[in-house]
Amino acid sequence: MTKIGFNDFSIGIMVAAYSLVMILTVVPAGILADRWSRKGVLIISSVVLAVSGIIGALSNTVPMYVVSTLFWGLYSALTYGTYDSIIYDVLIEEKGNAHEYETYYGRHKVFEGISFVIGSLSAGLIAEFDGLRATYWFSLPFIAVSIVFLIIFKDPIIHKAEGLAPIKEHVIQTLNSVLKNSSLIPIIVALITLEAVNTAVYEFSQLWFIAVAAPIIIFGPGNALVVSSWSLGGLFSKYMKGSRRIIFICIFMLVSSIALSLTHLIWFIIAAQTILSIGIVGLSVVLTHQLHDQLPSRVRAGASSTVSTMSIIILVPLAIIFGLLASQRSVFVANILLIAVLLIALGAIIFRKDFLKEKLL
C-alpha cells in the first residue's frame, strides 16, 4: 500500500470507506440470510472476495486499491452474523440446546485463526520470492475451495420454522430484538466496542512495526503472531465464563493496551497486540452466546448483523481519527484513543446488572 502512494492518514480513510460499505450492507445481508439461505449468502461472499482479490492484484493507484477494499467490505458484510447464527442453530437442531456454543464457535475461531497464520506466513514467503501482488493471485484457488465446501454444507432450517413475515415486519422485528431489549444493552455495547478496537488493532498493527523501523523479515512472523490471537481466543473462550475470570482477563487486556503506548520494543509490541486480541476474541465469543440466547432464530442473523453494523459505525470515526493522529503525531499517541474505547467495553462488561452473580463455570 505504501509503495503505491498510501500514508497513515489515507489508510485511515480507506478503512472508513470500506466500513461505510459495510454499514450500508451488513443488516440487509443478515436479513437476506434469515429469509433466504445463510449458506447462499456465504457463497456470494466468497465470489465477492475473489473479485476483491483480482482488483487488489491489478491495482497500481490508491483509488483502484480502495475499490478492492470496498469489495472486501461487502464480502465481510455478507459474513457478519452468519457463521455464529449457523453454529447456534445447528446446535439447537442437533443437540436440542446451545450449552456448548463456546466450544463449537470457539473451534470455528481456532480453525479460522490457523488459516490466518498459515496465510500470513506463506504470504511472506510468496512476497519475498514472487512479489507482493502474487499473494493476491495465490489466494484465489482457496476462495474457490471455500465455495465447494459451502455447497456441500447442509443449511440449518430452524430459522424458517415459524414462516416468513412480510419484509417490512421482518425488518422491524429484527431491529426491535436488538434495540428494545434492555437486558441486551450492556452486552451490545461491549460487543460493538470490543469489535471496533480489535478491528483497529488488526488493520493498524503494522503501523507500530513501521514506527519502530522493524526489519521487513519481522512483518511475516509478527503479523502471524497477532492473527494467531483469533485461534487462541477461540480456543480459550470456553474458559472465560464466570465473573472472576472475566475481571482477570479485562485487567490483562487493559495492561496490554496501555503497553502499546509505552513500549518501542518490537517483540513487546507484538506480544501486547496478541494478548489484547486474544482477550477480545475470547470475550466476544462468550458475549455472542449471551446475545443469541435472547434472540429468536427467525431474526438471528439479521440481529447479529445489526450489532456488527453498530460496531462499524463506531469504527469509521475511530479509523479516521486514529489515522490522523498517527500521521500527525505517532501511532503511540493514537493508541490512547483505543484505550479509551476499550475502557467503555470493559465497563459495560463488568458493571452490567447481575455480573458479579454469574457462576464461575
Image (cartoon, rainbow, N blue to C red):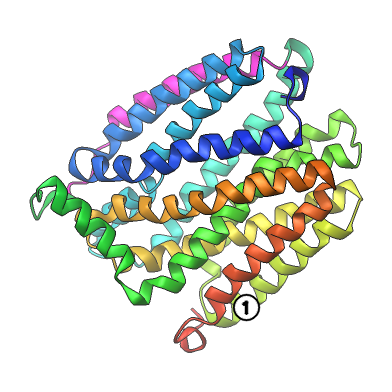
Assign the magenta stretch its main secondary structure: helix
Task: Answer left or right for 328 relative to 235.
Answer: right
Instruction: Count numbered badges in the picture.
Output: 1
| Location of residue 70 with respect to 167 vertically, above or below | above
> Is label 1 in a helix, a strand or a loop?
helix
* Residue 134 highlighted magenta (yes or no): yes
Residue 63 lies, in percent from the top left, at 60, 20
User: Mark 1 sits on what residue?
Assistant: 247
**Residue drawn at point x = 28 percent, y = 55 percent:** 300
Q: Is residue 303 above or below residue 246?
A: above
- Residue 243: % across, % down: 54, 81
Give residue 134's position: percent from left, percent from top.
65, 13
- Choose top left, top right, bottom left or bottom right for residue 162: bottom left
Question: Which of 121/279 is in front?
Answer: 279
Residue at x-position 22% and y-position 63%: 96
Q: Which residues are magenta?
A: 132-157
